[in-house]
């Protein structure tokens, strides 16, 4: 498959979703039953990727922020490290930074492991960077445990240690890495 030929289509109300199976029931049900409701409520935008007239992947985007809101001393030092690591100048350091969230991301069972997930991460980065009408520094995702490795391979990092051991952990990607590269 030529990945470069894949393009995202924004889900609209009249788009007919026939079936989708990525192996995760919640992610399947979201696309089939709920994605349009989220669109109605301006809560998230869903993009589908089609190949030979079927949806082979989808992802959702919404606004977010990366936030530091704990009195925990260890977390405070991690936040300082986060600021240093992402080279935020002292004068611009805040307790929160603008971000865009990957609400959901799924590739159908038949197409997993073919590079589509990575291609979608690149696609998301360009969507956000192209639409820089509103500032956005980071991409965030509440990653499933099974997908931690996927996001790490795509340059994401864990934000906090507070969710260590959980089945879902907050991860982030610094968009400035792309601008500087
Ligand atoms: C996670 C998911 C999106 C990855 O998509 P994909 O198209 O299979 O991934 P890719 O083929 O682009 O993989 C890119 C790299 O990540 C690695 N990777 C993919 N899935 C991985 C996983 N679950 N754990 C660790 N590494 C993974 C691949 O081996 C590849 O690495 P390589 O280039 O060194 O070989 C897909 O497997 C999926 O939809 N899973 C079910 C739903 C889900 O968990 N979504 C994430 C919700 S947060």
Image (tube, helix red, strand yellow):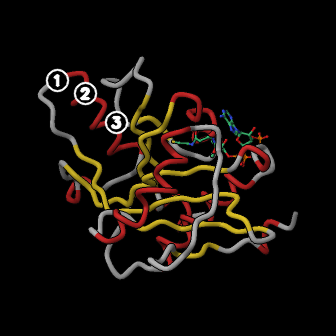
Residue 148 image offset from top left, x and y in percent: 56, 33
Q: Is residue 54 left or right of residue 18?
A: right
Gap between marks 1 and 2, in whole Å? 5 Å
Q: Quadrant of the N terminus?
A: bottom right
* Residue 139 visible to an observer of this rendering: no
Mark nearest the camera among 3 and 2 is 2
Residue under numbered circle 1: 72
Few, some or many residues within 10 Å of mark 2 (<14, 14–19, 20+) = some
Mark nearest the camera among 3 and 1 is 1
Q: Earlier in the sequence, mark 3 or mark 2?
A: 2
Please count the marks in the image: 3
Gap between marks 3 and 2, in whole Å? 10 Å
Per the image, label 1 sits on a secondary structure element best described as loop
The residue closer to the viewer here, 135 or 50, is 50
Pointers 1 and 2 in contact (CB under 8 A)? yes
The residue at the far left in this view is 71
User: Which label sits on residue 130?
Assistant: none
Quarter-wise, where is residue 139 in the image? bottom left
* Residue 108 visible to an observer of this rendering: yes
Residue under numbered circle 3: 81
Gap between marks 3 and 1, in whole Å? 14 Å
Pointers 3 and 2 in contact (CB under 8 A)? no
For ligand 1, the image quadrant comes to top right
Residue at 26 percent across and 29 percent down: it is: 77
Residue 94 image offset from top left, x and y in percent: 19, 52
Residue at 34 percent across and 31 percent down: it is: 160
The residue closer to the viewer here, 33 or 88, is 33
Residue under numbered circle 2: 75
Q: Earlier in the sequence, mark 3 or mark 1?
A: 1
């Amino acid at each position: 498959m030529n990945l470069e030929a894949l393009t995202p289509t924004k889900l609209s109300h009249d788009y007919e979703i026939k079936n989708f199976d990525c192996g995760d029931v919640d992610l399947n049900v979201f696309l089939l039953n709920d994605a349009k409701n989220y669109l109605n409520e301006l809560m998230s935008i869903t993009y589908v990727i089609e190949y030979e007239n079927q949806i082979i992947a989808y992802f959702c985007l919404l606004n977010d922020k990366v936030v530091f809101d704990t009195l925990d001393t260890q977390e405070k030092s991690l936040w300082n490290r986060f600021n240093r690591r992402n080279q935020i100048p002292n004068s611009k350091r805040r307790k929160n930074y603008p971000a865009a969230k990957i609400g959901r991301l799924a590739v159908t069972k038949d197409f997993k492991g073919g590079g589509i997930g990575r291609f979608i991460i690149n696609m998301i980065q360009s969507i956000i960077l192209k639409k820089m009408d509103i500032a956005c520094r980071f991409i965030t995702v509440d990653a499933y445990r099974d997908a931690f490795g996927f996001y790490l391979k795509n340059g994401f990092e864990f934000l906090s240690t507070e969710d260590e051991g959980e089945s879902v952990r907050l991860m982030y990607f610094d968009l400035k890495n792309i601008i500087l590269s």
